[in-house]
Amino acid sequence: MAASDIPATLVLEDGSVFRGRSVGSSGQRAFELVFHTGMTGYQEILTDPSYCGQAVVMTYPQIGNYGCQPQADESDRCWASAMIMRQLTPCTSSWTAEQSLQEYFLDRDVMAMDGVDTRELTLILRTKGAQRAIISTDTDDVDALLTLVRAHPSLDNRDLASEVSCKQSYSWSEGLPDTETWEPSDLHEGAPKLVCYDFGIKRNILRNLVSAGFAPVVVPANTPATDVMAMNPSAVFLSNGPGDPAAVTSAIKAVGELVAADMPLFGICLGHQILALALGGRTYKMKFGHHGANHPVVEPASGRIDISSQNHGFAVDADSLVGTGLEVSHYNGNDQTVAGLQHSSKPVFSVQYHPEGAPGPHDPEHLFQRFKALLAEPAAS
């Protein structure tokens, strides 16, 4: 499908204006605008619930080369509001593709535009921070669009996790594909029950948990700790998700109670931040966040460096962890922000990045096996 000739206008809250070509759905949407440094993974980005309320600038100049296929979806819909590109590829070259990226945009009602100087746009976001922005194919009236975008709420203090979470509990049994047949692997015999809080959970996280030896049961974000304990799980997992972690107050309360009950626990991304808040730490909004597939993460205790996939706009304040029982286990190699936590006496740990992304290509996947091994360790005295 050829790209349309419909013009699109992008206006940032600082007054910056970018004009390009609409290559997705028509209309008008406001959002927080962030940039992503990955060369691939556009379909996973679009369907990651962590991007709820945001649009993504892709820094790699040509996007869409290998098309789209259902197996790459991380959820059952697109959560990102829009995608901004230098160029949407004019052809789809992979034999695995079932549709082009533009067809995918249109089928999933995603606004998109190309013909944009994404280098200049990214520099604005790096210099001034993540910006509220608006994209429109309905009007080119910059003053009107600027008024709308400046009235658009920020992601601060917004509990988006509850918006994207499942409404009812469900079980998951599909593991990672077999390397020979590429068929999904099955649940391990006798796999322990793992309750997974859905703050915006990705399917590939669940696949990794199955392959690590768990039997996941996914529950809504607002599930009380008493309900979780009544399910008699062997451990609890805290998923990734969008928005401000401090706004997810019901989950913060539940996690604090689960830790106090000595429940083995592993958190990723938003789940990592909620863990810190549950034990008395603080989080803060980053200037432009981490969104990409090439972030080095350092584990000082072992000297190990993993290349990680990251997607977050908030971070844990290291200075706030005194007296919480949590210790910094990993830090980001680029800016030394907190990238991992471990409790000094309880079977609890978390990471700010996405081990299921494993862009190294397998670097952080070992954390799922570490979580499983945690169940066999004796409790600290």
Image (cartoon, rainbow, N blue to C red):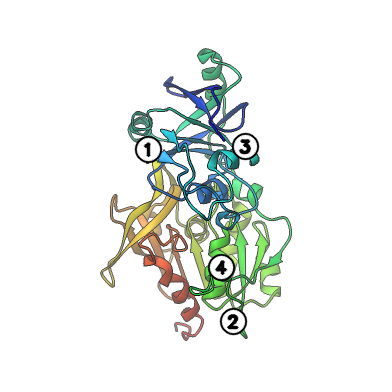
Q: Which residue is mark 3?
A: 106
Task: Tell me the quadrant of the picture where the N terminus can be found.
Answer: top right
Relative to 44, residue 126 above or below: above
Neighbourhood count class around disc 3 (C-alpha, 10 Å): few under 14, some 14–19, many 20 upward: some
- Which residue is found at the position 67% from the left and 78% from the top? 232
Compare marks 2 and 3 and give the one earlier in the sequence: 3
- x and y percentages locating residue 202 in the rendered image: 56, 58
Between tags 1 and 4, which lies in front? 1
- Which residue is found at the position 50% from the left and 28% from the top? 133
Compare marks 1 and 4 and give the one earlier in the sequence: 1
Point out which mark residue 61 bears.
1
Camera-side residue: 238 or 121? 121
Labelled pair 4, 3 in contact (Cβ < 8 Å): no
Q: Quadrant of residue 86?
A: top left
Relative to 160, residue 7 above or below: above
Q: Amino acid at mark 3?
A: Leu
Task: Tell me the quadrant of the picture where the C terminus can be found.
Answer: bottom left
Check disc 4 and report its element: helix, strand or loop: helix
Point out which mark residue 207 bears.
4
Q: Which residue is mark 2?
A: 188
Check disc 1 and report its element: helix, strand or loop: loop
Relative to 374, residue 47 above or below: above
Labelled pair 1, 4 in contact (Cβ < 8 Å): no
Compare marks 1 and 2 and give the one earlier in the sequence: 1
Label 4, label 3: how far apart the Cα atoms are: 28 Å
Q: Amino acid at mark 4?
A: Arg
Q: Residue furthest left?
A: 303
Q: Amino acid at mark 2?
A: His
Between tags 4 and 3, which lies in front? 3
Check disc 3 and report its element: helix, strand or loop: helix
Compare marks 4 and 2 and give the one earlier in the sequence: 2
Q: Amino acid at mark 1?
A: Pro
